[in-house]
């Protein structure tokens, strides 16, 4: 049944023959993580397909990378320049496609659209003195992704690279992705040099004590937003910090503020004739229309007809209102914002741009949480004149960073040279780290 596909983790139905023979596990990890950053593809790695073991054992098979949106499957191999590995990867991809068509629904095919996240063929860069060292990956034959290393933009022989750099990168990978060195040990019996265990990707979960009390009402919404805009799974032992701007944090813990606002406002559903201000009800209704043009531009790379943000829920949180938005698909052209709506949106377009930093587009079905702080007029009627809007940020933490992280504290300082910034799903935070406060943590 199609429902069974993707439900088994590689360590739950161990395909010993395949994993002990795998070459280049280090490169597999880096390429897979880069692929997972391409959110709009609905990417998966080590995806389980019933009975598809390449060794014919009847065990589950695990495809290296898979794109649900295009229904494409790839296998990853080192580029040997003589075409042997290209043919092998293509054959293995075709093998998985055959079993996927039997068990996972129609439409599956060997992948032809592989690209790196940045679109430049590079998945990882580091510097060794004056030397620039890069791992490159490319689409080859259908279903085949080939990788190779370059130093100062020149391809280097595999053995030369291994001798000089593999130990360093391997140690960095172990620190970044694994709970302990023991978790990184290669499969027993493997005979490949510099091997490391495949990553255990697990779903991040917000535990009962994983949010500060004022934001507990958003537990389910945060969890959905993380899975739909960041990742279905992160390396076991890592975590996701939920960060909000410090001004949002301060307003969020001020419950009396929102109560005063609502009492003074005495929410009305209609606008006065000639008025250029909105009530909360009107503001919430118009919010989806306000941000449509910004998101439509961001979604253009996904070849969507139009991406529409619809306000589906409003949740009071202390002195702010959290608005839950859903990305849907529509052929209807976005409506232009009115003058009043233009004033209401404030800096949200910039906030959304920062949230989208590093993303090609928002996938259909994504959920966003947006924070709104209404400002009131000084007139007797006390209507809203503007709303300050901001998006939270979600930042992957390594196991080491997680141990030093506390709720209600500023975002941890992370060195810009950290390998984690190059390998994990995160971009530098805008502004200072102290401008962002941790209100929640999702852990594996």
Image: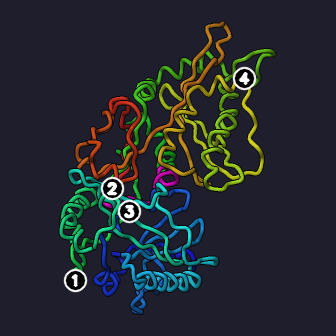
Q: Position of residue 212 (x, y in %)?
A: 37, 37
Image point 42% across, 78% down: which residue?
62
Contact between labelled residues 4 and 3, with CB atoms less than 8 Å apart: no
Q: Position of residue 146 (x, y in %)?
A: 42, 73
Res 212 seen here? yes
Magenta residues (range): 226-238
Find disc 2 in the rendering and name its residue: 125
Describe the element under mark 3 as helix, strand or loop: strand
Give the distance between the C-alpha atoms of the residues marked 1 and 3, in whole angstroms. 27 Å
**Label 4 neighbourhood size at 10 Å, few (<14), some (14-19), many (20+)?**
few
Res 232 seen here? no
Give the distance between the C-alpha atoms of the residues marked 1 and 4, in whole angstroms. 67 Å
Image point 42% across, 34% down: which residue?
244
Contact between labelled residues 2 and 1, with CB atoms less than 8 Å apart: no
Q: Which of marks 3 and 2 is nearer the N terminus?
A: 2
Compared to residue 391, the image places residue 182 above or below, namely below
Quadrant for the C terminus in the image: bottom left
Q: Position of residue 195 (x, y in %)?
A: 24, 73
Asked if residue 236 is among those painted magenta in the image, a careful observer would answer: yes
Q: Which of marks 4 and 2 is nearer the N terminus?
A: 2
Front of the two marks 1 and 4: 1
Describe the element under mark 2 as helix, strand or loop: strand
Image point 61% across, 53% down: which residue?
301
Find disc 1 in the rendering and name its residue: 191
Say whether residue 232 is left or right of residue 312.
left
Q: Which of marks 1 and 4 is nearer the N terminus?
A: 1
Nearer-the-camera pick, 85 or 255: 85
Image point 74% across, 27% down: which residue?
338
Find disc 3 in the rendering and name its residue: 202
Describe the element under mark 4 as helix, strand or loop: helix
């Amino acid at each position: 049944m199609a429902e069974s596909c993707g439900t088994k983790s590689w360590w739950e139905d161990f395909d010993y023959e395949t994993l002990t023979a795998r070459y280049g596990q280090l490169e597999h990890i880096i390429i897979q993580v880069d692929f997972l950053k391409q959110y709009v593809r609905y990417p998966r790695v080590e995806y389980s397909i019933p009975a598809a073991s390449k060794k014919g054992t009847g065990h589950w098979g695990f495809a290296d990378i898979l794109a649900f949106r295009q229904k494409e499957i790839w296998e990853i191999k080192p580029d040997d320049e003589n075409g042997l590995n290209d043919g092998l990867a293509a054959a293995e991809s075709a093998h998985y496609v055959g079993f996927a068509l039997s068990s996972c629904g129609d439409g599956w095919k060997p992948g032809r659209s592989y690209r790196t996240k940045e679109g430049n063929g590079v998945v990882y860069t580091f510097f060794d003195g004056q030397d620039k060292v890069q791992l490159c990956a490319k689409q080859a034959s259908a279903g085949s992704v080939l990788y190779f290393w370059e130093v100062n933009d020149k391809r280097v022989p595999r053995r030369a690279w291994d001798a000089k750099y593999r130990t360093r990168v391997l140690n960095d990978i172990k620190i970044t992705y694994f709970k302990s060195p023991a978790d990184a040990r290669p499969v027993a019996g493997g005979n490949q040099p510099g091997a490391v265990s495949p990553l255990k990707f697990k779903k991040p979960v917000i535990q009962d004590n994983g949010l500060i009390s004022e934001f507990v009402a958003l537990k389910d919404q945060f969890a959905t937003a993380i899975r739909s805009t960041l990742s279905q799974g992160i390396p076991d032992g890592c975590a996701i910090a939920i960060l909000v701007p410090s001004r949002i944090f301060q307003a969020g813990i001020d419950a009396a503020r929102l109560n005063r606002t609502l009492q003074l406002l005495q929410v009305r559903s209609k606008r006065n004739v000639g008025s250029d201000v909105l009530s909360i009800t009107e503001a919430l209704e118009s919010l989806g229309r306000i941000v449509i043009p910004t998101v439509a531009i961001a979604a253009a790379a996904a070849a969507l007809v139009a991406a529409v943000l619809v306000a589906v829920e409003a949740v009071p949180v202390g002195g702010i209102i959290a608005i839950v938005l859903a990305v849907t698909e529509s052929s209807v052209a976005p409506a232009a914002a009115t003058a009043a709506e233009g004033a209401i949106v404030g800096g949200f377009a910039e906030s959304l741009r920062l949230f989208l930093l590093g993303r090609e587009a928002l996938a259909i079905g994504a959920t966003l949480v947006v924070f709104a702080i209404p400002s009131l007029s000084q007139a007797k009627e006390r209507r809203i004149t503007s709303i300050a809007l901001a998006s939270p940020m979600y930042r992957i933490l390594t196991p080491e960073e997680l141990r030093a992280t506390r709720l209600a504290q500023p975002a941890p300082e992370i060195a810009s040279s950290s390998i984690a910034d190059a390998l994990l799903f995160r971009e530098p935070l805008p502004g200072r780290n102290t401008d962002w406060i941790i209100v929640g943590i999702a852990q594996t």
